[in-house]
Image: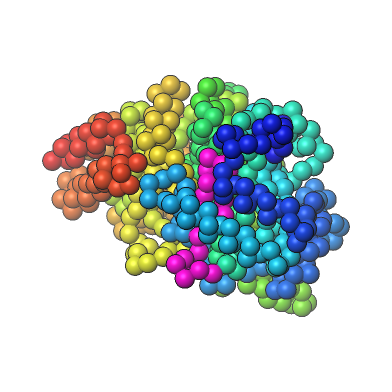
């Protein structure tokens, strides 16, 4: 019975904390007579095929019946227009300082009215793939966006008999079902870049003026992660996989990175290693604080198509595509043009069949956390031995924006940004995540590494460097040496990619990057009435590194 979708009559009252103005407005829209409910992938596929603007490719869906597609189904392409990534700047979170709930409640009422004369589709899915954590989520979109509804049913868990049974027997949570309302055609002079509004305490998201499927996926995860956080889980924007070593022991690793920084590349890499590799997911999971186990939230992979030309063996696993080109092959069949030739951040909803050893839950606690950064002052792999520093480097994860994001305003995409725990989807105070990760490192004795997947010494750190280094660590042949004078840090020497502490310029760049981290922590005391303020010890730890650097 997991999240709450139905109420006893006596519980339908103002005092019930599950209700709010925005939730009542959004849920009500799902019952209007302009709504058609899409129950299955087959229905969504049939409607998406008929939707204006859809391109029906000649690429067949591999094992269509496993995903609920009719026989002979083809990969559908639907492209978004100018914006092909997620718009972080559009996010507003009810409950945070300076977010006026009454104002947004009015705005949502108008947005809901705005779809009332158009036909809309709704659908339902499960978020969370283990009886320990499953929530129900409801999506509403105008009929012109049937492709997004199809993507939602494929990306999250559709209601098969097996999952209905699992859900019925799953752990109950005192939280309402998730409701996600979208109107990509919405326009408002005050929100030229759209609005992604969250009422996380009432499990509602309202996505307006935004077409990119990642908005709907990440909005749903935002709510699920917040619920997980409130129920003693750690919310993780990362990939996780498990190796079975020659002696039968397991090595479970999680790689946390901002959108487009390498989570999927690291997690889903076709592995020629001697070990058997099991994949949990490449984007989203939650860790149980109590026993250290991990649960995946989605079955499929919403991945970039940048690395997959038509010849790639990955193409076989594409279920749908977004923001890619289409052309004709030599016999005149419609096929896709990937590798971001058309535009940045081409995407596919990729079948979980791409990972034959896929699991949805890992009982064993993780052995290592890898923070994916793009901080040019750090060599390809740095080991962090101290649990406090491990959480501080997660807190001050320094990375770069990628084409997965729609950058609004005068922001240089090459500029380093600090994105704590690589999670821009947090809807609660940052200090809570810091404490959660710190406790995880302390209690569960987890190793921590930083992976720089960007540039070092002016040279690009390539996927083979990163993947090779991870293999070396697993094989136990990674010979780490002290990272200059910094206590608690060491690095893995890699030809042409080693730091030179004798070089003044290098030390200066490292100091600059640590100073950025210190500034970030200090700034949290001043912004948003100190909503995201961090414990004093965090500043002191970075100051100690700076002092060591002289
Ligand atoms: N060292 C590296 N490690 C991982 N990915 C890298 C590296 N260097 C370049 N890349 C490229 O960066 C992109 C990362 O995309 P992806 O793995 O889909 O990111 P995410 O899953 O975090 O959104 C891929 O195109 C990958 O080939
Ligand atoms: C889909 C997204 O994320 P990722 O690149 O992490 O898959 C996104 O943030 O829009």
Q: Is residue 301 magenta?
A: no
* Percent x, y of residue 363: 60, 26
Numbered marks: total: 0
In the displayed structure, 468 sits above or below 413; it is above
Residue 377 seen in the current view: yes
The answer to whether 23 appears left or right of 234 in the picture is: right
Quarter of the image where the N terminus is located: top right
* Percent x, y of residue 338: 60, 67
Residue 188 versus residue 263: which sits nearer the camera?
188
Residue 132 versus residue 463: which sits nearer the camera?
132
Residue 515 versus residue 304: which sits nearer the camera?
515
- Name which residue lies at 59% across and 62% down: 111
The answer to whether 210 appears left or right of 95 in the picture is: right
- Name which residue lies at 78% across and 55% down: 38
- Name which residue lies at 40% across and 39% down: 429
* Percent x, y of residue 61: 77, 58
- Name which residue lies at 43% across and 30% down: 436
* Percent x, y of residue 125: 71, 45
Question: Which residue reaches farthest right?
Answer: 71
Q: Is residue 206 magenta?
A: yes
Q: What residue span does the magenta drawing correspond to? A: 187-207
The answer to whether 281 appears left or right of 194 in the picture is: right
Q: Give residue 421's quadrant in the image.
A: top left
Q: Give residue 536's quadrant in the image.
A: top left
In the displayed structure, 301 sits above or below 134; it is below
Residue 277 seen in the current view: no
In the displayed structure, 367 sits above or below 515; it is above
Quarter of the image where the C terminus is located: top left
Q: Give residue 52's quadrant in the image.
A: bottom right
């Amino acid at each position: 019975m997991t999240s709450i979708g139905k109420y006893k009559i006596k519980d339908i009252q103002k005092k019930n904390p599950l209700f709010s103005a925005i939730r009542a407005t959004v849920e009500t829209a799902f019952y209007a007579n302009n709504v058609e409910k899409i129950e299955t992938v087959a229905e969504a596929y049939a409607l998406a095929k008929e939707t204006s603007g859809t391109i029906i490719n000649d690429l067949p869906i591999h094992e269509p019946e496993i995903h609920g597609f009719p026989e002979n189904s083809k990969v559908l392409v639907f492209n978004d227009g100018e914006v092909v990534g997620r718009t972080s700047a559009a996010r507003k979170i009810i409950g945070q300082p300076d977010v006026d709930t009454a104002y947004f409640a009015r705005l949502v009422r108008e947005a809901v009215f705005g779809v009332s004369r158009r036909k809309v589709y709704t659908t339902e899915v499960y978020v969370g793939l283990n009886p320990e954590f499953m929530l129900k989520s409801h999506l509403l979109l105008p009929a012109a966006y049937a492709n997004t509804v199809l993507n939602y049913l494929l990306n999250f868990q559709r209601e098969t008999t097996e999952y209905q049974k699992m859900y019925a027997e799953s752990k109950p949570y005192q939280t309402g079902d998730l409701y996600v309302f979208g109107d990509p055609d919405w326009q408002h002079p005050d929100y030229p870049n759209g609005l992604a509004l969250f009422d996380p305490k009432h499990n509602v998201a309202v996505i307006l003026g935004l077409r990119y499927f990642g908005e709907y996926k990440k909005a749903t995860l935002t709510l699920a992660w917040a619920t997980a956080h409130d129920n003693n889980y750690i919310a993780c924007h990362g990939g996780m996989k498990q190796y079975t070593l020659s002696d039968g022991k397991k090595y479970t690793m999680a790689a946390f990175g901002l959108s487009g920084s390498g989570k999927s590349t690291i997690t889903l890499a076709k592995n020629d290693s001697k070990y058997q590799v099991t994949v949990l997911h490449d984007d989203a999971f939650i860790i149980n604080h109590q026993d250290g186990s991990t649960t995946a939230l989605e079955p499929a992979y919403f991945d970039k198509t940048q690395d997959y030309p038509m010849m790639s063996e990955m193409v076989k696993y594409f279920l749908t595509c977004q923001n890619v080109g289409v052309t004709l092959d030599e016999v005149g069949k419609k096929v896709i043009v990937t590798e971001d030739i058309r535009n940045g951040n081409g995407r596919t909803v990729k079948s979980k069949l791409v990972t034959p050893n896929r699991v949805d839950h890992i009982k064993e606690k993780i052995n290592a956390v890898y923070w994916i950064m793009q901080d040019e002052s750090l060599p390809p792999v740095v080991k962090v031995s101290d649990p406090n520093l491990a959480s501080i480097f997660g807190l001050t994860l320094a990375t770069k924006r990628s084409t997965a994001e729609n950058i609004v305003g005068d922001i240089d995409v090459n500029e380093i940004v600090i994105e704590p725990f690589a999670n821009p989807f947090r809807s609660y105070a940052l200090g809570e995540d810091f404490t959660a990760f710190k406790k995880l490192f302390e209690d569960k004795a987890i190793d921590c590494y930083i992976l720089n997947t960007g540039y070092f010494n002016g040279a690009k750190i390539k996927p083979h460097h990163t993947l090779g280094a991870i293999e070396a660590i697993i094989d136990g042949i990674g010979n780490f040496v002290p990272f200059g004078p910094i206590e608690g840090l060491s690095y893995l020497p890699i030809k042409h990619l080693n730091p030179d502490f004798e070089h003044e310029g290098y030390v200066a760049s490292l100091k600059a990057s640590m100073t950025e981290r210190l500034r970030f922590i200090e700034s949290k005391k001043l912004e948003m009435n100190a909503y995201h303020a961090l414990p004093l010890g965090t500043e002191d730890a970075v100051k100690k590194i700076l002092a060591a650097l002289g």
